[in-house]
């Protein structure tokens, strides 16, 4: 089921566009935000392919800075027990994952990834994708067609529990207490078992 490689998508007409206005609640640099316009930040091409009740999407994130912070996705978690699989097609990415129980973050880690790497998002982990480079990031994902994304928790806290900035990682002060940030390595191959993509 491994997705075919695709060239950079240039037709923005098909894309769902995430603008700065859509992201203003989760931006770290509020001073910069006050004077910013409504720039297009990234592009989501959903439903490019389907198989076994899974959906294949592509997201393109240009190299941008939101003031002191590297451009990122808004961040979300999944209702239910659905996981997700990301594949970096071009560029570099940092995936930040956090698990919250009872309103407290119990685990938070990041994965640095480059072209060809596969990143598993386990069930119950909210996640944000960051483009930390000065080149476009193009990534694919496989996700269940039954999965519903939830943005409220991230928006309420003004972002994930860490921001990635020109000065490195900075804690989000809207969280009372967060665990120490640690790292994990990406997978180098497409997983043989995709059961984590389905609700159990």
Image: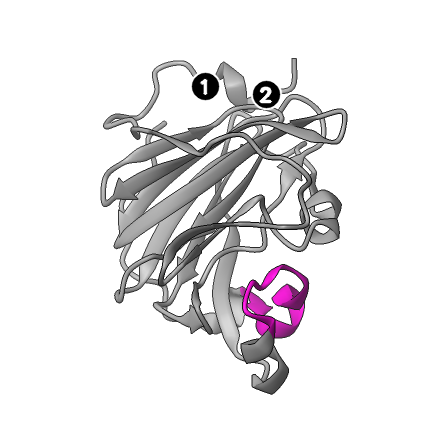
Residue located at (62% from left, 44% from top): 76
Provide residue 74's location: percent of width, then percent of height.
58, 55
Disc 1/disc 2 C-alpha distance (Å): 8 Å
Q: Which of 145 and 96 is in front in this view?
A: 96
Residue located at (26% from left, 53% from top): 90
Position of residue 114 in the picture relative to residue 120 (left or right): left
In the image, residue 154 sits, relative to residue 179, either above or below, namely below
Q: In which quarter of the image is the N terminus?
A: top left
In the image, residue 18 sits, relative to residue 178, either above or below, namely below
Residue located at (60% from left, 72% from top): 30
Q: Which of 105 and 1 is in front in this view?
A: 105
Task: Check disc 2: other Cα within 10 Å, few if <14, some if 14-19, many if 20+.
Answer: some
Position of residue 191 in the picture relative to residue 12 (left or right): left
Residue 194 got which mark?
Answer: 1
Q: Is mark 1 on a helix, strand or loop?
A: loop
Asked if the stretch drawn in magenta spans residue 54, the answer is: no
Provide residue 45's location: percent of width, then percent of height.
50, 56
Asked if the stretch drawn in magenta spans residue 19, the answer is: yes
Q: Which span is picked out in magenta?
A: 16-30
| Residue 11 visible in the snapshot | no
Residue located at (26% from left, 55% from top): 91
Q: Nearer the viewer, residue 37 or 5?
A: 37
Position of residue 130 in the picture relative to residue 147 (left or right): left
């Amino acid at each position: 089921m491994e997705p075919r490689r695709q060239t950079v998508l240039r037709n923005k007409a098909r894309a769902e566009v995430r603008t700065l206005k859509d992201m203003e609640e989760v931006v770290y640099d509020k001073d910069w935000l006050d004077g910013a316009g409504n720039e297009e930040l990234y592009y989501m091409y959903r439903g490019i392919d389907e198989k076994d009740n899974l959906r294949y999407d592509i997201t393109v994130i240009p190299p941008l800075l939101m003031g002191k912070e590297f451009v990122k996705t808004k961040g979300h978690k999944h209702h239910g027990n659905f996981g997700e699989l990301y594949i970096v097609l071009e560029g570099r990415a940092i995936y930040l994952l956090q698990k919250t129980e009872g309103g407290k973050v119990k685990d938070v880690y990041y994965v640095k990834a480059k072209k060809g790497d596969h990143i598993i998002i386990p069930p119950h982990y909210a996640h944000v994708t960051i483009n930390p480079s000065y080149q476009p990031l193009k990534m694919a994902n496989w996700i269940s067609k039954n999965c519903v994304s939830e943005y409220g928790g991230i928006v309420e806290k003004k972002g994930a529990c860490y921001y990635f900035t020109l000065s490195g990682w900075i804690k989000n002060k809207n969280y009372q207490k967060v665990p120490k940030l640690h790292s994990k390595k990406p997978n180098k191959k497409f997983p043989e078992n995709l059961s984590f993509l389905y609700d159990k």
